[in-house]
Protein backbone atom coordinates (compact mmCIF):
# COMPACT_ATOMS: atom_id res chain seq x y z
CA UNK A 1 0.00 0.00 0.00
CA UNK A 2 1.05 3.61 -0.49
CA UNK A 3 0.87 6.14 2.36
CA UNK A 4 0.85 9.93 2.16
CA UNK A 5 4.62 10.11 2.54
CA UNK A 6 5.26 8.09 -0.63
CA UNK A 7 6.25 4.91 1.23
CA UNK A 8 5.32 1.59 -0.32
CA UNK A 9 4.78 -1.36 2.02
CA UNK A 10 4.41 -4.73 0.29
CA UNK A 11 2.31 -7.44 1.93
CA UNK A 12 4.74 -10.23 1.04
CA UNK A 13 7.80 -8.47 2.55
CA UNK A 14 8.68 -8.03 6.23
CA UNK A 15 6.88 -5.16 7.86
CA UNK A 16 10.13 -3.48 8.86
CA UNK A 17 11.26 -3.18 5.19
CA UNK A 18 9.96 -0.01 3.53
CA UNK A 19 10.83 1.35 0.14
CA UNK A 20 10.77 5.09 -0.39
CA UNK A 21 9.87 5.67 -4.01
CA UNK A 22 8.59 8.61 -5.90
CA UNK A 23 5.04 8.47 -7.23
CA UNK A 24 6.09 7.96 -10.89
CA UNK A 25 8.08 4.79 -10.17
CA UNK A 26 5.43 3.62 -7.71
CA UNK A 27 2.64 3.82 -10.29
CA UNK A 28 4.76 2.01 -12.91
CA UNK A 29 5.63 -0.72 -10.41
CA UNK A 30 2.04 -1.22 -9.27
CA UNK A 31 0.67 -1.23 -12.80
CA UNK A 32 3.14 -3.94 -13.85
CA UNK A 33 2.19 -6.05 -10.84
CA UNK A 34 -1.57 -5.76 -11.37
CA UNK A 35 -1.28 -6.20 -15.15
CA UNK A 36 0.83 -9.37 -14.90
CA UNK A 37 -1.39 -10.79 -12.17
CA UNK A 38 -4.51 -10.13 -14.24
CA UNK A 39 -3.03 -11.78 -17.34
CA UNK A 40 -1.86 -14.76 -15.34
CA UNK A 41 -5.26 -15.12 -13.69
CA UNK A 42 -7.03 -14.78 -17.03
CA UNK A 43 -4.80 -17.42 -18.66
CA UNK A 44 -5.31 -19.81 -15.76
CA UNK A 45 -9.07 -19.32 -15.85
CA UNK A 46 -9.15 -19.89 -19.61
CA UNK A 47 -7.02 -23.04 -19.33
CA UNK A 48 -9.12 -24.43 -16.49
CA UNK A 49 -12.30 -23.63 -18.41
CA UNK A 50 -11.10 -25.49 -21.51
CA UNK A 51 -10.08 -28.50 -19.46
CA UNK A 52 -13.43 -28.60 -17.66
CA UNK A 53 -15.37 -28.31 -20.92
CA UNK A 54 -13.28 -31.10 -22.49
CA UNK A 55 -13.84 -33.34 -19.48
CA UNK A 56 -17.56 -32.67 -19.36
CA UNK A 57 -17.97 -33.46 -23.07
CA UNK A 58 -15.89 -36.63 -23.37
CA UNK A 59 -16.01 -38.00 -19.83
CA UNK A 60 -19.20 -38.22 -17.87
CA UNK A 61 -19.22 -37.53 -14.18
CA UNK A 62 -21.23 -40.69 -13.78
CA UNK A 63 -18.32 -42.79 -15.04
CA UNK A 64 -15.71 -43.12 -12.26
CA UNK A 65 -13.24 -45.01 -14.40
CA UNK A 66 -13.18 -42.19 -16.90
CA UNK A 67 -12.36 -39.52 -14.33
CA UNK A 68 -8.79 -40.73 -14.34
CA UNK A 69 -8.44 -39.73 -18.02
CA UNK A 70 -10.08 -36.32 -17.88
CA UNK A 71 -6.87 -34.51 -18.80
CA UNK A 72 -5.69 -37.19 -21.26
CA UNK A 73 -6.86 -37.80 -24.82
CA UNK A 74 -7.21 -41.56 -25.20
CA UNK A 75 -7.19 -43.06 -28.68
CA UNK A 76 -8.60 -46.60 -28.70
CA UNK A 77 -6.87 -48.73 -31.33
CA UNK A 78 -8.17 -52.18 -30.32
CA UNK A 79 -10.66 -54.08 -28.17
CA UNK A 80 -10.37 -57.36 -26.28
CA UNK A 81 -13.15 -59.91 -26.79
CA UNK A 82 -14.22 -62.23 -24.03
CA UNK A 83 -13.37 -65.89 -24.56
CA UNK A 84 -15.48 -68.79 -23.37
CA UNK A 85 -12.71 -70.34 -21.34
CA UNK A 86 -9.07 -69.72 -20.53
CA UNK A 87 -8.38 -73.40 -19.91
CA UNK A 88 -5.87 -74.61 -22.55
CA UNK A 89 -7.35 -78.11 -22.48
CA UNK A 90 -10.76 -76.82 -23.61
CA UNK A 91 -9.44 -74.81 -26.56
CA UNK A 92 -9.27 -77.78 -29.02
CA UNK A 93 -12.80 -78.81 -28.02
CA UNK A 94 -14.17 -75.32 -28.55
CA UNK A 95 -12.32 -75.06 -31.86
CA UNK A 96 -13.80 -78.30 -33.17
CA UNK A 97 -17.30 -77.45 -31.91
CA UNK A 98 -17.52 -74.01 -33.50
CA UNK A 99 -15.80 -75.07 -36.71
CA UNK A 100 -18.27 -77.93 -37.20
CA UNK A 101 -21.25 -75.68 -36.41
CA UNK A 102 -20.00 -73.07 -38.85
CA UNK A 103 -19.52 -75.59 -41.66
CA UNK A 104 -22.96 -77.14 -41.08
CA UNK A 105 -24.55 -73.69 -41.13
CA UNK A 106 -22.86 -72.72 -44.38
CA UNK A 107 -23.55 -76.02 -46.12
CA UNK A 108 -27.17 -76.20 -44.94
CA UNK A 109 -28.10 -72.67 -46.01
CA UNK A 110 -26.18 -72.98 -49.27
CA UNK A 111 -28.01 -76.22 -50.03
CA UNK A 112 -31.39 -74.53 -49.54
CA UNK A 113 -30.38 -71.66 -51.83
CA UNK A 114 -29.21 -74.03 -54.57
CA UNK A 115 -32.28 -76.27 -54.22
CA UNK A 116 -34.70 -73.37 -54.53
CA UNK A 117 -32.91 -71.66 -57.41
CA UNK A 118 -32.49 -74.90 -59.38
CA UNK A 119 -36.15 -75.99 -59.14
CA UNK A 120 -38.59 -73.90 -61.17
CA UNK A 121 -41.51 -75.16 -59.09
CA UNK A 122 -40.07 -73.34 -56.06
CA UNK A 123 -39.89 -69.93 -57.72
CA UNK A 124 -42.64 -68.54 -55.49
CA UNK A 125 -42.67 -65.66 -52.98
CA UNK A 126 -42.40 -67.98 -49.98
CA UNK A 127 -39.21 -69.66 -51.23
CA UNK A 128 -37.84 -66.36 -52.50
CA UNK A 129 -37.93 -65.04 -48.93
CA UNK A 130 -36.58 -68.38 -47.67
CA UNK A 131 -33.50 -67.97 -49.90
CA UNK A 132 -33.03 -64.43 -48.58
CA UNK A 133 -33.30 -65.72 -45.00
CA UNK A 134 -30.71 -68.44 -45.67
CA UNK A 135 -28.35 -65.87 -47.16
CA UNK A 136 -28.76 -63.61 -44.11
CA UNK A 137 -28.16 -66.55 -41.75
CA UNK A 138 -24.96 -67.51 -43.57
CA UNK A 139 -23.76 -63.91 -43.45
CA UNK A 140 -24.61 -63.57 -39.76
CA UNK A 141 -22.58 -66.62 -38.81
CA UNK A 142 -19.68 -65.65 -41.09
CA UNK A 143 -19.46 -62.27 -39.38
CA UNK A 144 -18.53 -63.72 -35.98
CA UNK A 145 -17.43 -67.35 -36.04
CA UNK A 146 -14.33 -67.09 -38.33
CA UNK A 147 -12.84 -64.37 -36.12
CA UNK A 148 -13.50 -66.50 -33.06
CA UNK A 149 -11.86 -69.54 -34.69
CA UNK A 150 -8.79 -67.52 -35.69
CA UNK A 151 -8.55 -66.12 -32.16
CA UNK A 152 -8.73 -69.64 -30.76
CA UNK A 153 -5.91 -70.80 -33.02
CA UNK A 154 -3.68 -67.81 -32.30
CA UNK A 155 -4.65 -67.58 -28.61
CA UNK A 156 -5.53 -63.93 -29.10
CA UNK A 157 -8.72 -62.09 -28.24
CA UNK A 158 -7.63 -58.75 -29.72
CA UNK A 159 -9.67 -57.09 -32.46
CA UNK A 160 -8.79 -53.75 -34.01
CA UNK A 161 -10.99 -50.70 -33.59
CA UNK A 162 -11.91 -50.63 -37.29
CA UNK A 163 -12.44 -54.40 -37.31
CA UNK A 164 -14.73 -54.19 -34.30
CA UNK A 165 -16.91 -51.49 -35.85
CA UNK A 166 -17.01 -53.42 -39.13
CA UNK A 167 -18.07 -56.60 -37.35
CA UNK A 168 -20.72 -54.69 -35.41
CA UNK A 169 -22.09 -53.11 -38.60
CA UNK A 170 -22.33 -56.42 -40.47
CA UNK A 171 -23.88 -58.12 -37.47
CA UNK A 172 -26.61 -55.47 -37.25
CA UNK A 173 -27.33 -55.67 -40.98
CA UNK A 174 -27.74 -59.46 -41.01
CA UNK A 175 -29.62 -59.81 -37.72
CA UNK A 176 -32.11 -57.06 -38.62
CA UNK A 177 -32.50 -58.66 -42.04
CA UNK A 178 -33.44 -61.90 -40.26
CA UNK A 179 -35.86 -59.98 -38.09
CA UNK A 180 -37.72 -58.28 -40.92
CA UNK A 181 -37.61 -61.27 -43.27
CA UNK A 182 -39.40 -63.38 -40.66
CA UNK A 183 -42.03 -60.64 -40.48
CA UNK A 184 -42.38 -60.54 -44.27
CA UNK A 185 -42.68 -64.34 -44.38
CA UNK A 186 -45.45 -64.16 -41.78
CA UNK A 187 -47.25 -61.63 -43.98
CA UNK A 188 -46.79 -63.94 -46.97
CA UNK A 189 -48.41 -66.83 -45.08
CA UNK A 190 -51.25 -64.54 -43.99
CA UNK A 191 -52.02 -63.59 -47.60
CA UNK A 192 -51.74 -67.21 -48.80
CA UNK A 193 -54.15 -68.57 -46.17
CA UNK A 194 -56.56 -65.68 -45.61
CA UNK A 195 -56.68 -64.36 -49.21
CA UNK A 196 -55.76 -67.33 -51.43
CA UNK A 197 -57.64 -66.08 -54.50
CA UNK A 198 -55.73 -62.78 -54.51
CA UNK A 199 -52.35 -64.22 -53.55
CA UNK A 200 -50.73 -63.93 -56.99
CA UNK A 201 -51.94 -60.36 -57.37
CA UNK A 202 -50.89 -59.18 -53.89
CA UNK A 203 -47.54 -61.00 -53.72
CA UNK A 204 -46.36 -60.09 -57.20
CA UNK A 205 -42.61 -59.98 -57.99
CA UNK A 206 -42.48 -56.20 -57.70
CA UNK A 207 -43.97 -56.22 -54.20
CA UNK A 208 -41.67 -59.04 -53.11
CA UNK A 209 -38.65 -57.07 -54.30
CA UNK A 210 -39.92 -53.96 -52.52
CA UNK A 211 -40.37 -55.84 -49.24
CA UNK A 212 -36.86 -57.25 -49.48
CA UNK A 213 -35.45 -53.80 -50.26
CA UNK A 214 -37.28 -52.26 -47.29
CA UNK A 215 -35.83 -54.95 -45.02
CA UNK A 216 -32.33 -54.14 -46.20
CA UNK A 217 -32.87 -50.37 -45.82
CA UNK A 218 -34.15 -50.87 -42.27
CA UNK A 219 -31.11 -52.97 -41.33
CA UNK A 220 -28.73 -50.50 -42.95
CA UNK A 221 -30.36 -47.60 -41.10
CA UNK A 222 -29.86 -49.31 -37.75
CA UNK A 223 -26.23 -50.00 -38.61
CA UNK A 224 -25.64 -46.36 -39.59
CA UNK A 225 -27.30 -45.18 -36.38
CA UNK A 226 -24.87 -47.15 -34.22
CA UNK A 227 -21.91 -45.96 -36.29
CA UNK A 228 -22.96 -42.32 -35.97
CA UNK A 229 -23.02 -42.74 -32.19
CA UNK A 230 -19.76 -44.68 -31.85
CA UNK A 231 -17.47 -43.08 -34.43
CA UNK A 232 -17.16 -39.63 -32.75
CA UNK A 233 -16.50 -41.19 -29.32
CA UNK A 234 -13.05 -40.28 -27.94
CA UNK A 235 -13.32 -41.87 -24.51
CA UNK A 236 -14.22 -45.43 -23.48
CA UNK A 237 -14.50 -46.81 -19.98
CA UNK A 238 -12.46 -49.87 -20.92
CA UNK A 239 -11.44 -51.91 -23.95
CA UNK A 240 -12.78 -55.32 -22.84
CA UNK A 241 -16.01 -56.37 -24.58
CA UNK A 242 -18.07 -58.83 -22.52
CA UNK A 243 -18.95 -61.01 -25.50
CA UNK A 244 -17.25 -63.20 -28.09
CA UNK A 245 -18.01 -60.60 -30.78
CA UNK A 246 -18.51 -56.83 -30.95
CA UNK A 247 -22.06 -56.76 -29.64
CA UNK A 248 -23.64 -53.32 -30.24
CA UNK A 249 -25.20 -53.21 -26.77
CA UNK A 250 -21.84 -54.00 -25.17
CA UNK A 251 -20.08 -51.26 -27.14
CA UNK A 252 -22.71 -48.72 -26.13
CA UNK A 253 -22.13 -49.68 -22.51
CA UNK A 254 -18.43 -48.85 -22.89
CA UNK A 255 -19.05 -45.28 -24.06
CA UNK A 256 -17.73 -42.79 -21.53
CA UNK A 257 -20.74 -40.49 -21.70
CA UNK A 258 -24.10 -39.96 -20.11
CA UNK A 259 -26.11 -43.17 -19.75
CA UNK A 260 -29.18 -41.32 -21.02
CA UNK A 261 -27.90 -41.58 -24.62
CA UNK A 262 -27.42 -45.33 -24.27
CA UNK A 263 -30.95 -45.78 -22.87
CA UNK A 264 -32.56 -43.70 -25.62
CA UNK A 265 -30.81 -45.69 -28.35
CA UNK A 266 -31.58 -49.07 -26.81
CA UNK A 267 -35.27 -48.31 -26.24
CA UNK A 268 -35.69 -46.79 -29.70
CA UNK A 269 -34.04 -49.77 -31.39
CA UNK A 270 -36.07 -52.22 -29.28
CA UNK A 271 -39.34 -50.55 -30.28
CA UNK A 272 -38.59 -50.05 -33.99
CA UNK A 273 -36.75 -53.32 -34.66
CA UNK A 274 -38.20 -55.57 -31.98
CA UNK A 275 -41.71 -54.62 -30.93
CA UNK A 276 -42.98 -53.58 -34.38
CA UNK A 277 -41.88 -56.79 -36.22
CA UNK A 278 -43.14 -59.00 -33.40
CA UNK A 279 -46.47 -57.19 -33.44
CA UNK A 280 -46.74 -57.81 -37.18
CA UNK A 281 -45.97 -61.51 -36.75
CA UNK A 282 -48.46 -61.93 -33.90
CA UNK A 283 -51.18 -60.11 -35.83
CA UNK A 284 -50.55 -62.24 -38.94
CA UNK A 285 -50.76 -65.48 -37.00
CA UNK A 286 -53.85 -64.31 -35.15
CA UNK A 287 -55.57 -63.85 -38.51
CA UNK A 288 -54.16 -67.17 -39.77
CA UNK A 289 -55.41 -69.14 -36.78
CA UNK A 290 -58.81 -67.48 -36.96
CA UNK A 291 -59.08 -68.37 -40.63
CA UNK A 292 -57.91 -71.97 -40.13
CA UNK A 293 -60.38 -72.61 -37.34
CA UNK A 294 -63.21 -71.79 -39.74
CA UNK A 295 -62.13 -74.60 -42.11
CA UNK A 296 -64.68 -77.45 -41.68
CA UNK A 297 -62.53 -80.48 -42.56
CA UNK A 298 -59.68 -81.65 -40.24
CA UNK A 299 -57.52 -82.45 -43.28
CA UNK A 300 -57.81 -78.90 -44.54
CA UNK A 301 -56.88 -77.48 -41.14
CA UNK A 302 -53.84 -79.77 -40.92
CA UNK A 303 -52.67 -78.79 -44.41
CA UNK A 304 -53.05 -75.10 -43.60
CA UNK A 305 -51.12 -75.47 -40.34
CA UNK A 306 -48.35 -77.47 -42.02
CA UNK A 307 -47.65 -74.68 -44.51
CA UNK A 308 -46.71 -72.26 -41.72
CA UNK A 309 -45.39 -74.73 -39.12
CA UNK A 310 -41.75 -74.41 -40.20
CA UNK A 311 -41.86 -70.64 -40.19
CA UNK A 312 -43.50 -70.56 -36.76
CA UNK A 313 -40.79 -72.86 -35.39
CA UNK A 314 -38.04 -70.58 -36.73
CA UNK A 315 -39.78 -67.52 -35.27
CA UNK A 316 -39.96 -69.14 -31.84
CA UNK A 317 -36.26 -70.09 -31.95
CA UNK A 318 -35.13 -66.66 -33.16
CA UNK A 319 -37.16 -64.47 -30.84
CA UNK A 320 -37.05 -66.89 -27.91
CA UNK A 321 -33.26 -67.06 -27.79
CA UNK A 322 -32.87 -63.35 -28.64
CA UNK A 323 -35.18 -62.23 -25.84
CA UNK A 324 -33.50 -64.69 -23.50
CA UNK A 325 -30.11 -63.06 -24.13
CA UNK A 326 -31.33 -59.54 -23.48
CA UNK A 327 -33.37 -60.53 -20.44
CA UNK A 328 -30.40 -62.41 -18.99
CA UNK A 329 -28.21 -59.34 -19.46
CA UNK A 330 -30.75 -57.26 -17.53
CA UNK A 331 -30.43 -59.65 -14.57
CA UNK A 332 -26.66 -58.99 -14.41
CA UNK A 333 -25.51 -62.52 -15.07
CA UNK A 334 -21.84 -63.29 -15.45
CA UNK A 335 -20.28 -62.22 -18.77
CA UNK A 336 -19.44 -65.80 -19.75
CA UNK A 337 -23.04 -66.92 -19.23
CA UNK A 338 -24.29 -64.06 -21.38
CA UNK A 339 -21.72 -65.00 -24.05
CA UNK A 340 -22.91 -68.61 -23.96
CA UNK A 341 -26.51 -67.45 -24.36
CA UNK A 342 -25.47 -65.30 -27.32
CA UNK A 343 -24.12 -68.41 -29.06
CA UNK A 344 -27.62 -69.90 -29.12
CA UNK A 345 -29.01 -66.68 -30.53
CA UNK A 346 -26.38 -66.03 -33.20
CA UNK A 347 -24.93 -69.43 -34.12
CA UNK A 348 -27.27 -72.27 -33.16
CA UNK A 349 -30.46 -70.75 -34.59
CA UNK A 350 -28.99 -70.07 -38.09
CA UNK A 351 -27.64 -73.63 -38.06
CA UNK A 352 -31.06 -75.13 -37.23
CA UNK A 353 -33.07 -73.14 -39.78
CA UNK A 354 -32.13 -75.31 -42.81
CA UNK A 355 -33.02 -78.49 -40.92
CA UNK A 356 -36.34 -77.06 -39.76
CA UNK A 357 -37.39 -76.09 -43.28
CA UNK A 358 -36.02 -79.20 -45.00
CA UNK A 359 -37.45 -81.71 -42.54
CA UNK A 360 -40.94 -80.19 -42.49
CA UNK A 361 -41.23 -79.28 -46.17
CA UNK A 362 -41.76 -81.90 -48.84
CA UNK A 363 -40.96 -79.52 -51.70
CA UNK A 364 -37.57 -78.65 -50.20
CA UNK A 365 -36.73 -82.34 -49.60
CA UNK A 366 -37.71 -83.27 -53.16
CA UNK A 367 -35.68 -80.39 -54.65
CA UNK A 368 -32.69 -81.28 -52.46
CA UNK A 369 -32.74 -84.92 -53.53
CA UNK A 370 -32.98 -83.88 -57.16
CA UNK A 371 -30.08 -81.50 -56.71
CA UNK A 372 -27.91 -84.22 -55.13
CA UNK A 373 -28.83 -86.71 -57.88
CA UNK A 374 -30.77 -88.97 -55.55
CA UNK A 375 -34.03 -88.60 -57.45
CA UNK A 376 -34.77 -88.21 -61.14
Image (spheres, rainbow, N blue to C red):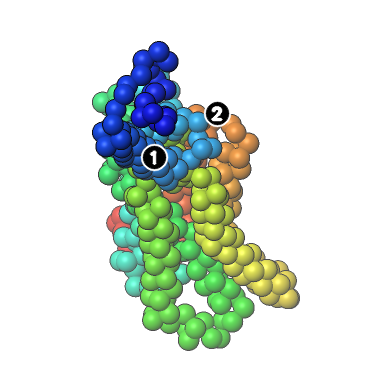
- Of tags 1 and 2, the one toward the viewer is 1
Q: Judging from the image, what secondary structure is the residue with disc 2 in?
A: loop
Inspect this view and state whether residue 112 appears.
no
In the picture as drawn, the residue positioned furthest to the front comes out as 5
Which one is nearer the viewer's eye here, 359 or 324?
A: 324
Quick one: quadrant of the C terminus? Answer: bottom left
| Location of residue 295 (image quadrant) | bottom right
Q: Which residue is at a point 57% across and 44% down the rendered structure image?
A: 326
Distance, label 1 to label 2, CA atoms, is 46 Å
Which one is nearer the viewer's eye here, 184 or 198?
A: 184
Above or below, 8 relative to 358: above
> Of marks 1 and 2, which one's residue comes earlier in the chain?
1
Q: Percent position (x, y) of residue 78?
A: 30, 35
Q: Percent position (x, y) of residue 250?
A: 46, 41
Q: Which residue is at a point 39% across and 81% down the rendered structure image?
A: 206
User: Crowdedness of circle 2 by 10 Å Cα count: few (<14), some, many (20+)?
Assistant: few
Which one is nearer the viewer's eye here, 258 or 347?
A: 258
Label pair 1/2, CB-CB below 8 angstroms: no
Q: Which residue is at a point 28% across and 31% down the rendered structure image?
A: 22
Q: Which residue position is annotated with label 1? A: 45
Which one is nearer the viewer's eye here, 122 or 23?
A: 23
Above or below, 141 relative to 173: above
Q: Percent position (x, y) of residue 340?
A: 50, 33
Q: Which mark is residue 168?
A: none
Report the number of discs.
2
Inspect this view and state whether residue 154 appears.
yes
Q: Percent position (x, y) of residue 352?
A: 47, 47
Quick one: quadrant of the N terminus? Answer: top left
Above or below, 20 relative to 329: above
Q: Judging from the image, what secondary structure is the residue with disc 1 in?
A: helix
Q: Which residue is at a point 50% across and 68% down the rendered structure image?
A: 184
Q: Which mark is residue 334?
A: 2
Amino acid sequence: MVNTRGVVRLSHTPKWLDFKLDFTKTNTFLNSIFHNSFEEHLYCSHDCFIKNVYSSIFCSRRSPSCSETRNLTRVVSEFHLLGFSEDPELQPLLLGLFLSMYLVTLLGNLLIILAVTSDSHLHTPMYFFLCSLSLADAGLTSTMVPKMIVGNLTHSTVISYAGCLTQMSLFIIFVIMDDFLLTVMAYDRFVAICHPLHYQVIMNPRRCGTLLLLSFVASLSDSLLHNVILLPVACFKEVEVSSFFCDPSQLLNLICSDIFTHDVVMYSVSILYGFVPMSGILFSYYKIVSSILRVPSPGGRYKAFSTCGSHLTVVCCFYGTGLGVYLSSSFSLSPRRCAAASVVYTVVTPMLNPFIYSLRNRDIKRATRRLLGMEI
